[in-house]
């Protein structure tokens, strides 16, 4: 594991490094990205940087400097690297008064990398009782205000599931705590539109581009009762079949999931970059 904060690599990656008054601490005034790293190469860093800037603008933070972010990514990936890792970029509000309003401190840029185990081939899902607010100010932004996701994932874990999925205020399928959802009904692969409040996942975007799916918003029950296949997408899962949703067993990975995974593996090499 390596940690880079405000332009320097920490000798001890777990040493305290963020100011206690950073506005990202306590009030969650920050944005972040998670990039997949395979044998030291970054998957689609440009798409993640684009989204980091979009999230920062959505939250009203200044734009992070992409060159500085790339310097941080290179610094944490120098030397020996594990075969499979996660790299997290965080851009938080910086020094601020002890209140909700932002100070005039410079935001803090943090880059951390740590090895991770690849995800299992299939996942299990629980629907959570709390809605995603698709009309909220932070809808679709990847902010550090992820407390709702932490709560929802714990709820899923208590039920023996590996991911939690939200409906939105309209009762339509939205997304998981760290994943987008694709499902098959009547042989058609579908996924919610961005108006559902889901994050514009990098993996979601590439599955739409490389494999294709219909973007549609519909009640979550269509998925929980009628889908013949479901898969999740995220930057470290890629395309992961779902073998159980609440109490319903599913074919996983089903035929369409298998095809989408195959296309993913054929194409993903195009987007790896050295730091
Ligand atoms: C809430 C949420 N939805 C979806 C995703 C999947 O996005 P990506 O494919 O960019 O990892 C993530 C993970 O980043 C997430 O946190």
Image: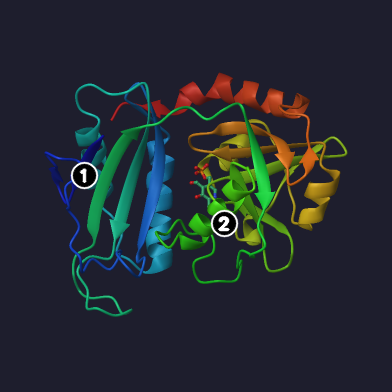
Instruction: From the viewer's perspective, tell me whether residue 226 is left or right of residue 94.
Output: right
Residues at marks 1 and 2, CA–CA distance in whole angstroms: 27 Å
Residue 153: horizontal and vertical position, in percent?
55, 51
Which scheme is used to colour this image of the protein? rainbow
Picture quadrant where residue 125 is located: top right
Q: Residues within 10 Å of mark 2 (few under 14, many from 20)?
A: many
Q: Number of marks in the image?
A: 2
Expressed as whole percent of the image width and height from the top left, the position of residue 196 reads: 66, 60
Q: Which residue is mark 2?
A: 152
Q: Secondary structure at mark 1?
A: loop
Q: Quadrant of residue 145?
A: bottom left
Q: Earlier in the sequence, mark 1 or mark 2?
A: 1
Residue at numbered disc 1: 14
Using the rendered image of the protein, determine whether residue 199 is visible from the camera's viewpoint.
Answer: no
Labelled disc at residue 238:
none
Residue 180 is situated, as x and y percent measured from the top left of the image, at 60, 46
Specify whether 220 is left or right of 162. right
Q: What residue is rendered at 51% in x and 42% in y?
A: 202
Report if residue 206 is visible in the image.
yes
Q: Is residue 96 above or below residue 194?
A: below
- SS class, disc 2: helix
């Amino acid at each position: 594991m390596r940690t880079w904060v405000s332009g320097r690599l920490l000798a001890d990656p777990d040493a305290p490094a963020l100011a206690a008054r950073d506005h990202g601490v306590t009030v969650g005034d920050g944005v972040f990205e998670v990039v997949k790293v395979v044998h030291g190469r970054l998957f689609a860093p440009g798409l993640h940087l684009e989204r980091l800037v979009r999230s920062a603008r959505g939250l009203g933070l200044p734009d992070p400097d992409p060159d500085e972010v790339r310097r941080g990514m290179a610094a944490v990936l120098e030397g020996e690297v594990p075969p499979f890792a996660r790299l997290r970029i965080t851009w938080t509000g910086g020094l601020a008064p002890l209140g909700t309003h932002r100070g005039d401190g410079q935001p803090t840029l943090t880059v951390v990398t740590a090895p991770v185990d690849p995800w299992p081939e299939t996942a299990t899902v629980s629907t959570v009782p709390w809605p995603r607010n698709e009309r909220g100010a932070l809808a679709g932004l990847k902010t550090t205000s992820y407390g709702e996701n932490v709560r929802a994932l714990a709820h899923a874990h208590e039920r023996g599931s590996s991911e939690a999925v939200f409906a939105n205020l309209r009762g339509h399928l939205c997304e998981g705590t760290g994943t987008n959802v694709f499902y098959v009904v009547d042989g058609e692969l579908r996924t919610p539109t961005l108006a559902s409040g889901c994050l514009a996942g990098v993996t979601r975007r590439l599955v739409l581009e490389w494999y294709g799916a219909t973007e549609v918003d519909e009640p979550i029950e269509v998925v929980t009762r009628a889908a013949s296949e479901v898969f999740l997408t995220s930057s470290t899962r890629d395309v992961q079949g779902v073998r159980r949703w609440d109490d319903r067993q599913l074919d996983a990975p089903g035929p369409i999931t298998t095809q989408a995974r195959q296309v993913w593996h054929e194409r993903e090499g195009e987007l790896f970059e050295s730091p």
